Amino acid sequence: MTDRWVSFDCYGTLIDWRRGIRRELERLFGPHAAPHLLERFHELEPELQRETYRSYRDVLRLALVRLAEEQRQELVSGEASALADSLPRWPSFPEVAAALEEVHRRNRRIAILSNSDRDLIAASQRQLTVPFDLVVVAEDVGSYKPALGHWKRFFAESGAERRQDVHVGASEFHDIRPAVELGLTSVWVNRLGEAGQAEPTREIRDLTPLPEILEEITGT
């Protein structure tokens, strides 16, 4: 039987990064500033990633420094690394463990394609109960999604054909648009109820229905 693959984004899809980042922003800048700063972070992050390749740890550090500058607040020694240092504690979404276990039980191979570093993704994997067959991070390919380097490495290492992979992600910008560009079957985990430009194969609000949806859209 041909291997059936499901590739997942990690942060925002499996790991609740908004919750993890917001907790650090509340600690550093106070609860009233945190909601605005969280949205500002999501603007800064892709800007920093487009400038030049740098480690995700450095992206998190520079984003936090710029947020502090915009708040006219000086970070004390060591605080610039607060987001990266907190990442191992960012929680997974409550339904993720059961959904991944069921996908794995149905004999699908699973991969992570993440805009992060090897050490950071390893920390997050310890929260996820199912072992992944393949992990590709930005550090491996020297670029960040929505660039296509993650998928090129994934297909090269997995030996899968495009028709054999379903890509699952929460970011329409980082994951669904490039998946559609590549002609992949895709599932948008639209946790925030956002409007999108791309047309995924399916759209869901969390991972609970994913095992059944995979059976439906692949026919196996």
Image (cartoon, helix red, strand yellow):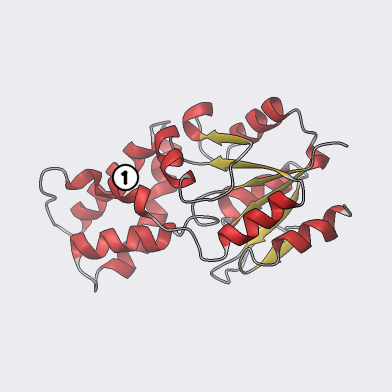
Q: Which of these two is toward me, 110 or 16?
A: 110
- Kindly identify the residue that appears in the image at 56 percent across and 55 percent down: 171
- 196 sits left or right of 16 in the view: right
Q: What residue type is labelled 1?
A: Ala
- 21 sits left or right of 140 in the view: left
Residue 97 to residue 175: above or below: below
- 135 sits left or right of 1 in the view: left
Which percent across, then down, holds residue 191? 56, 67
Q: Which of these two is toward me, 53 or 207?
A: 207
Q: Which of these two is toward me, 138 or 2?
A: 2
- 38 sits left or right of 33 in the view: right
Q: In which quarter of the image is the N terminus?
A: top right
Residue 99 to residue 45: above or below: below
Which percent across, then down, holds residue 60? 33, 45
What is the quadrant of residue 34 in the picture? Answer: bottom left
- Kindly identify the residue that appears in the image at 50 percent across and 57 percent down: 12
- Can residue 197 be spotted in the picture? no
What is the quadrant of residue 195 in the picture? Answer: bottom right
Instruction: Find disc 1 in the rendering and name its residue.
Output: 84
Residue 123 to residue 31: above or below: above
- Kindly identify the residue that appears in the image at 70 percent across and 53 percent down: 103
Which type of secondary structure does the marked residue at label 1 adopt?
helix
Which percent across, then down, holds residue 71? 19, 60
